[in-house]
Amino acid sequence: MTYTTTELDALKRALATGERRVSFGDKTIEYRSVEELQVAIRTVDTEIARNSGKSLVRQLRVTTRKAT
């Protein structure tokens, strides 16, 4: 599915304001939880980046220490 930045902005706005219901044109979606809304944001963000030829860079740093 092709997503737009308008849809991504609407999802982010809903998260910022505490709303769980988001409307895109004639469609309305109500998310069950904040976590579900965050997953939708990540999904749309990833798809937009993939369709534009960009990739999202995620960086993970692990620090370990030897126990004494």
Image: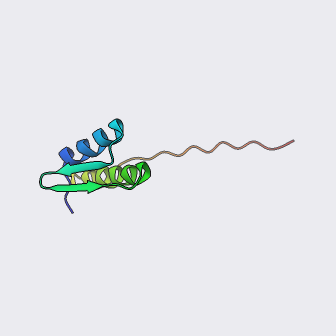
- The figure's colour scheme reads rainbow
Q: How many marks?
A: 0
Q: Is residue 56 shown left or right of residue 6?
A: right
Q: Is residue 7 visible?
A: yes
**Residue shown at 12% from the left, 52% from the top:** 25
**Residue shown at 33% from the left, 49% from the top:** 41
In this view of the protein, which residue sits in the foreground, 38 or 54?
A: 38
Q: Is residue 54 visible?
A: no
The C terminus appears in which quarter of the rendering?
top right
- Where's residue 50, x and y in %? 27, 55
- Where's residue 27, x and y in %? 17, 57
**Residue shown at 32% from the left, 53% from the top:** 46
**Residue shown at 20% from the left, 45% from the top:** 5
Q: Residue furthest top?
A: 17
- Where's residue 17, x and y in %? 33, 36
The N terminus appears in which quarter of the rendering?
bottom left
- Where's residue 19, x and y in %? 32, 43
In this view of the protein, which residue sits in the foreground, 22 or 1?
A: 22
Residue 12 higher or lower than 4, as above or below = above
Q: Residue furthest right?
A: 68
Q: Residue furthest left?
A: 26
Residue 5 higher or lower than 27, as above or below = above
Residue 61 higher or lower than 39, as above or below = above
Q: Residue furthest bottom?
A: 1
Q: Is residue 67 shown left or right of residue 35?
A: right
